[in-house]
Image (cartoon, rainbow, N blue to C red):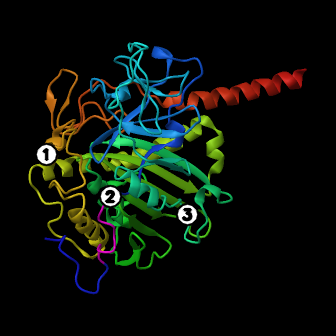
Amino acid sequence: MAAEEEKSGAVTCRHMPTDVRNQWYAIALSEDMPKPVVGKVGMKAPNPIGTSILGDPIVLWRDSAGMARCLADKCPHRSAPLSQGKVNGQTGNLECIYHGWQFEGDAGKTTCIPALQESKDIPKNATVRVYPVFEEDGVVYVWPGSIDDAALADKPARDRMDDGTPLREAPGYTVQTLCIDLPIDHSLLIENLLDPAHIPFSHEGTIGKREKAEALDMKVVKTPKGIRGICKGKEEYFNAFEAPALIILHTPPVPGKMDMWQYTACTPTSPGQVRVVHRSYRNWAKWVDKIGPLKRMFDAFSEKILFQDYSLLIGQHQRLREGANPWNSSIQVDILPVIYRNFYKRTFGNHTKDGPWWRGWDGSLDVEDLDRIGAFSKDFDCNGCALPVRPHHPRNMLEFSGQPAFPLRPQPADSTWKTWAPVATAVMAAGITAVVMKRA
């Protein structure tokens, strides 16, 4: 097999941390975190964010002080999902939708039970597990392991250039962000992002050209918690992995002039599921951010690049579910993802009771069962007929009605006019204004 232990003297995965539960994971963008709105309660109040981390169901929101909070997504009363509740605008606490119980985010204590008699005390076991949270550079991180270990651990590293400059503070740079959930095992996405050889083919029509395909000789070096690969003759570019689940890419369109750094967290929400928290920093085309329609086009182009890999990764994931190996043969440029796969085998690939995955509220859930919970195993066309495994994603602009192997679903009309209409309207308005002013 390709993913065998690396030869003696070569770069390996053995310096990477293997306790992947006691690590920080990017889970949301700061700008997406719901916060209490003064006076808004009940149906008018904002919803919290419900997601998972290593299978643990969690819920996130901001309290009245603006602090990001994270609790286990289970009410201590009747086990209802707290993520279906509300962020109370009067208290800033999380309110369960079932009976209105409220919970603060610092210690997970119940602060209010509307149906409780005044003479009665709140039950001592009416508490919710708290997950440590850290926020930096517009990203919210969650620690799924021990609270005590989190207090002693280093905080997540900032997004930086090689010279140490924080990219959020770098003069002349702007940032583009994306947070999206995909029904793909996080390991497959990480290996995909560590693989420069797929770009001319998978990304043909966007950032790739078939005629640009060439032999690649990858040199690998160690980083503090991961690996970095640089192809011979392309020293300005690199692909890097930092444990437990971060990809760093340096992909300047024009080295020395147009620069780009990409930080992509591939957070394993559960087996077969990944949350992508992406930040892309560039020092060119910054003016795009100031023109709404153009920024939306720019963002859509970035998502199109992501979804060019979507179908093939879904298919690869299905083959692994059927018992196929993630690697059968490899060549020299595959060394980065091969090293990563060895790291995965020692960490996330551990499906025993000592592994990192959540095992249910009572500790008895098998990882195989967890993999099936919420699994995206079927899609359906507009007639309700099952289709080949390739789940529809509402953000996937590459789905076309009637195309073989694509979901046959009603598609909205061409929305190109929606993109250009605001621009055209603005130009026309400016022209009319100029004519009126001239005549006046």
**209 sits left or right of 163 in the view:** left
Cα distance between the residues tagged 1 and 2: 24 Å
Q: Is residue 17 magenta?
A: yes
Q: Earlier in the sequence, mark 3 or mark 1?
A: 3
Per the rendering, the mark at residue 366 is 1
User: Mark 2 — residue?
Assistant: 190
* Corner quadrant of residue 409: top left
Residue 132 visible in the shown view: yes
Residue 165 percent location from the top left of the image: 61, 65
Say what secondary structure mark 1 lies in. loop
Residue 208 visible in the shown view: no
For image coordinates 26% across by 55% down, the residue present is: 188
For image coordinates 39% across by 69% down, the residue present is: 225
Pointer 3 local density, CA inside 10 Å: few below 14, some 14–19, many at least 20: some
Per the rendering, the mark at residue 160 is 3
Say what secondary structure mark 3 lies in. loop
Q: Earlier in the sequence, mark 2 or mark 3?
A: 3
**368 sits left or right of 173 in the view:** left
What amino acid is found at the position of numbered circle 2 in the picture? Ile
Considering every residue shown, the one lying at the far right of the view is 440
Q: Which residues are magenta?
A: 12-21
Pointer 1 local density, CA inside 10 Å: few below 14, some 14–19, many at least 20: some
Q: Is residue 283 magenta?
A: no
Above or below, comparing residue 210 to residue 224 in the picture:
above
Residue 372 percent location from the top left of the image: 16, 40
Q: Please tell me whether mark 1 or mark 2 is closer to you in this view.
A: 1
Cα distance between the residues tagged 3 and 1: 39 Å
Observer-nearest of 105 and 124 = 124
